[in-house]
Image (tube, rainbow, N blue to C red):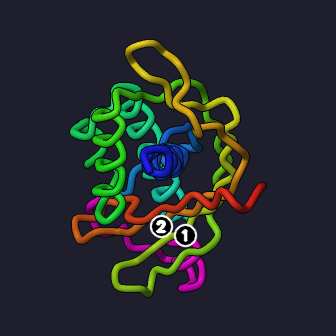
Amino acid sequence: MRARQLSRWTAGLVAVAAVGTSTACGAPEASTTSPPERSGPAGTDRADDEKAAERAALKAYSGYLKASRTASRHSDPQHPELTRFLADPLLTRVRLGLRQAREHGAVSAGTLRSDPTVVSVNLDAEPPTVEIQDCLDATGYRLVYVANEKVVPGTRGSRHLATATATRYPDGRWLISTGSAHQDQPC
């Protein structure tokens, strides 16, 4: 029974950590003010708005990965950068994973590699969203026990698909609100 609980715990931690602990592409932050008026055709405005949304979403994703990586190195569920880039329900899930790692005396070690791309932009949704797909390479990533720096059993990483949703909130910020590691889907 204890082995099955440990296996579920480590699988959950690797999934949360693998979605949120690597570096990604950056882009400028979204503005909290209205966009300036343009004199070009309406289609140009729409394309420009979508490109700006893509850049802002990738910046939020990059910030999320960086903040999660930093927080997981110390298993700190209250790391202040988490709320800068994440929103619920993902924020709660990441914090829970970090809290569980802390309770078990584990922290992250190693490197994750990321290659995110925007797969869709929906500015007409309420609220507007951007879907991101990433190929995470977690082969060099492990959870280790703080006490002896031994690898936590069952935390062997892989290269797999991860998805995330960036949502634009009323204050103009783009935050990552959902994310999933698809460890059964290699990339």
Q: Which residue is mark 1?
A: 131
Which residues make up the magenta segment? Answer: 32-50
Residue furthest out toward the front: 1
The secondary structure type at the circle numbered 2 is: strand
- Point out the tag, 2 or 1, that comes first from the N-terminus: 1
Residue at 37% from the left image edge and 64% from the top image edge: 177
Residue 84 appears at what percent x and percent y? 28, 47
Residue 165 appears at what percent x and percent y? 47, 67
The secondary structure type at the circle numbered 1 is: strand
Label 1 neighbourhood size at 10 Å, few (<14), some (14-19), many (20+)? many
Quadrant position of residue 178:
bottom left
Q: Which mark is residue 142?
A: none
In the rendered view of the protein, which quadrant contains the C terminus? Answer: bottom right
Most foreground residue, 31 or 70: 70
The Cα–Cα distance between marks 2 and 1, rounded to whole angstroms, is: 5 Å
Query: Is the C-beta separation of discs 2 and 1 under 8 Å?
Result: yes
Q: Which residue is mark 2?
A: 165
